[in-house]
Image (tube, helix red, strand yellow):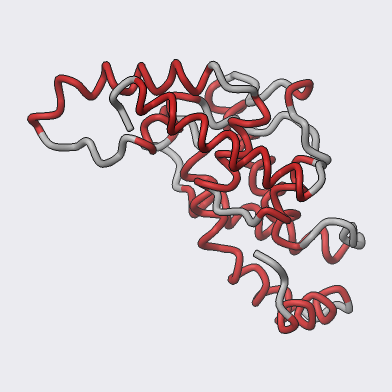
Amino acid sequence: MVATDDNMILLERADAGDPHALGELLEQSRERLLQIVSFRMDQRLRSRIDPADVVQDAFMEATRRFGEQKRDDRIPFFLWMRLLTLQRLAELHRRNLGVKARDAGREVSIFSGPLPQATSAVIAAQLLGGLTSPSQAAIRVETRLAVEEKLNEMETLDREILVLRHFEKLSNQETAKVLDIKQSAASNRFIRALKKLKAELQEEGLG
């Protein structure tokens, strides 16, 4: 989502110390952040932790940081909030599950660090969300495993681009920023990865 003139004005006011402007910016990002948390949260935490609480914790952190230090102007506001939110989610993963979220060496983002990974299993489950009728229950597991296998065969960067564009609904510009690549490269890789996945699923009779 490209920043509008109104958002730029709000951001300038927030940077100048206006708490009401910051509050408006946070509220504008809430729904997108909730979707991201819901997608990347480990299945084992879903009965214990509300994604809304994760986002609210990130809002509190953002408010604190605005008061203590300047936000990096090179990072768009929403991507900064996404980073704070995923850092909070990673902390909850470590605290509750005792596991690392993502090896920092695999994080190709300028926001490098151990952020929660969208696994092939989660992506497959989202892609197959329409298979819910009892008559399809017998083929659901087999189908999901086949989709997971195809996703695991993809390059890590291509799989992440699919997640960012298709599930997190980031714009091409935002995706390029997150992955620290050119916008043209982000666009080309997304189109290529999507076409490749669709073609492979069709070959398996899953498309």
For the C terminus, the quadrant is top left
Residue 60 percent across, percent down from the top left: 68, 59
Q: Residue furthest left?
A: 135
The image shows residue 125, relative to residue 8, as above or below, that is: above
Q: Residue at the location (65% across, 53% down)?
A: 58
The image shows residue 197, relative to residue 26, as above or below, that is: above
Name the residue nearer the viewer: 70 or 196: 196
Q: Residue at the location (9% across, 32% down)?
A: 134
Name the residue nearer the viewer: 59 or 206: 206
Q: Residue at the location (59% across, 42% down)?
A: 191
In the picture provided, is 191 more to the left or to the right than 175? left
User: Residue 200, located in which quarter of the rendered image?
Assistant: top left
User: Residue 24, located in which quarter of the rendered image?
Assistant: bottom right
Residue 91 percent across, percent down from the top left: 65, 34
Q: How many marks?
A: 0
In the picture provided, is 154 more to the left or to the right than 13? left
In the picture provided, is 175 more to the left or to the right than 128? right
Residue 203 percent across, percent down from the top left: 36, 22
For the N terminus, the quadrant is bottom right
In the picture provided, is 131 more to the left or to the right than 106? left
Name the residue nearer the viewer: 126 or 181: 181
Q: Residue at the location (67% across, 51% down)?
A: 82
Residue 201 percent across, percent down from the top left: 38, 26
